[in-house]
Image: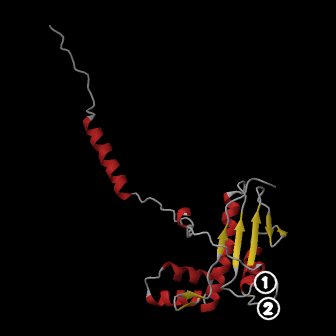
Amino acid sequence: MAKRQRDEPQINSSSMADIAFLLLIFFLVTTTIANDRGLSLQLPPNPDDIVDVDIKIPERNLFKILVNSSDKLLVEGEPLEDVTKIREMIKEFVLNNGRDPKSSDSPKDAIVSFKTDRGTSQDMFISVLDQVQAAYYDMYAERIGVTNEQWREIANDLSDPENKRLYDKGRGLKNGQLEFPMNISIAEPSKTSN
């Protein structure tokens, strides 16, 4: 009696490739990829397009913020430990309207100068810049009688005509000129120092 050879059972792997392919398509179609918005900054123009003009800015219209490589703050020549205090200091400086001879002449003339060091951490840079922008957002919001959060919502949806009207009113846009511009000067970082 002859022995019958049995074939060993095998798993058909061709259907596994089909399943893997279907899963790949499923995840490609259903996955949403987070899109970081980052900082909204107006970048400087191309250096080749800049015309060298000597502009004299009165010292009283400059609010100076310096950060060294150890993330130490120097605001208006004085050391400052708490970054959050910058917000109120800027509002007081910008809204001076010439009352204090050591502070700005008007919101239009006020410039916040922010200079860092090459060793300054990115967290510190963003923290200071957040405080500067928050100070301006507070002032814009106050001009139209809303909160800072409501101002940011208005600024995020300028397709609505009412939001656009409030946005222009908050920044003081008249005849194409801003009465209340956000003048922030971010200087090129200096070489590492302490």
Q: Position of residue 103 (x, y in %)?
A: 78, 83
The residue type indicated by label 1 comes to Ser
Looking at the figure, which quarter contains the C terminus?
Answer: bottom right
Q: Position of residue 10 (x, y in %)?
A: 27, 27
Name the spot of residue 161 as percent of width and height, x first.
44, 89
Q: Identify the residue under disc 2.
A: 99
Front residue of 105/116: it is 105
Label 2 residue SS: loop
Crowding at dot 2, Cα within 10 Å, few <14 / some 14-19 / many 20+, comes out as: few
Between residues 28 and 42, which one lies in front from this camera angle? 42
In terms of image quadrants, where is residue 152?
bottom right
Q: Quadrant of residue 73?
A: bottom right
- Circle number at residue 38: none
Q: CA distance from mark 1 to mark 2?
A: 8 Å
Identify which residue, 85 or 178, lies in the foreground: 178
Rendered residue at 76%/56% (across/down):
69
93 relative to 79, above or below:
below
Position of 194 compared to 176: left or right? Answer: right
Residue in front for this viewpoint, 135 or 98:
98
**Which SS class for mark 1?**
loop
Q: Which residue is mark 1?
A: 103
In the displayed structure, 65 sits above or below 144; it is above
Badge 2 amino acid:
Arg
